Image (spheres, helix red, strand yellow):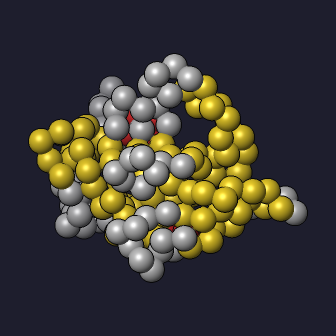
Amino acid sequence: MQQKTKIIIGRREKANFPDLGLMDIDVKIDTGAYTSSIHCHNIEEHSKQLHCHFLDEAHPDYNHRKLVFDRYNRTVVKSSNGITEPRYKIFTKIEVGGQEYPLELTLTDRGEMRYPVLIGRKFLNKKFLVDVSLTNNLKNKKKHEG
């Protein structure tokens, strides 16, 4: 059985979220986290849609941008300190290194965190190897490389 070569990803990367209209967003790669999450607030359901505002002070054009989702559900996330929290989960795409991948993101207030998006091992598994000595390793990769 031939094993697919994994892509080396750094501890921090730049990513695009084309379905959300968010480009060049700082993401933290976190092998300690199972799920991936995005920093949002004012999360509310209206007429079978989920509404929220994305927060990222590093991107004034995107900070407080309203996002609306038709495809979402609820899940329970366990934090590193063992506390469980109910969250909404959305289904979208992420683009890193010129490649697009499906991605599930939970919506949460990451106000105390440095990066607006955290990418966990559920997404990383089988696709990436994390090299913690690298940052923005995939920024200049093209679709035809690797």
Task: For residue 5, say whether it is visible.
Answer: no
Residue 123, image quadrant: top left
Left or right: residue 5 versus residue 78 is left
Q: Position of residue 39 (x, y in %)?
A: 50, 54
Residue 81 higher or lower than 26, as above or below: above
Residue 73, image quadrant: top right
Residue at 12% x, 42% y is 133
Q: In which quarter of the image is the C terminus?
A: bottom left
Residue 141, image quadrant: bottom left
Q: In which quarter of the image is the N terminus?
A: top left
Q: How many marks?
A: 0
Residue at 21% x, 47% y is 10
Q: Where is residue 111 in the image (x, y as percent from the top left)?
A: 46, 51
Q: Where is residue 22 in the image (x, y as percent from the top left)?
A: 46, 70
Residue at 45% x, 80% y is 61
Left or right: residue 52 versus residue 138 is right
